[in-house]
Image (spheres, helix red, strand yellow):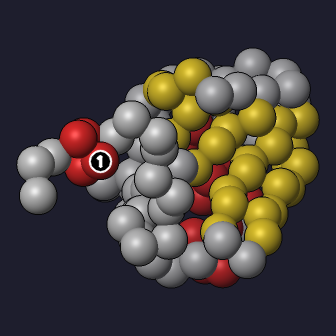
Amino acid sequence: MLVSVAYSEPAGQIWLHLEVPEGAVVRDAIERSGILQQFPWIDLATQKVGIFGRLVKLDTPLRPGDRVEIYRPIRCDPQTVPRREGSLAEHEAP
């Protein structure tokens, strides 16, 4: 059956289509995709995965057409994120 595996980095994203056997699970698709070799820092023990934006476990069975997504931790630099109006910091006493 045909499924896809997607992973995104700040510099771009990769979205691969591949055939997996009937009965394949999320982990099977990720391993067959070759993404783990391309991005060796992906750690499936700690990173979340999903199908079409819904979190799932690595042993979740796949259906034809599923898009497996590997989510990376969100890292935010407070100096590059614009402040929202009305933020707590704006209301603090001097």
Residue 83, relative to residue 85: is it above or below? below
Residue at point 80%, 63% (across, down): 14
Answer left or right for 60 relative to 19.
Answer: left
Answer left or right for 54 relative to 46.
Answer: right
Residue at point 75%, 19% (across, down): 63
At label 1, which amino acid type do we have? Glu
Question: How many numbered dots are placed on residues in this image?
Answer: 1
Residue at point 84%, 23% (across, down): 64
Residue at point 73%, 77% (across, down): 11
The image quadrant of residue 3 is top right
Quadrant of the drawing holding the C terminus: bottom left
The percent position of residue 47, horizontal first and vertical second, equals 39, 52
The percent position of residue 19, horizontal first and vertical second, equals 86, 44
Classify mark 1: helix, strand or loop.
Answer: helix
> How many C-alpha atoms fall within 10 Å of the one at disc 1: few (<14), some, or many (≥20)?
few
The percent position of residue 23, horizontal first and vertical second, equals 65, 25
Residue 91, relative to residue 72: is it above or below? above
The image quadrant of residue 45 is bottom left
Judging by the rendered image, the residue that carries numbered circle 1 is: 90
Report the residue that reaches farthest toward the front.
94
Answer left or right for 55 relative to 68.
Answer: left
Q: Is residue 37 visible?
A: yes
The image quadrant of residue 41 is bottom left
Q: Is residue 21 visible?
A: no
Nearer to me, 57 or 29: 57
Quadrant of the drawing holding the N terminus: top right
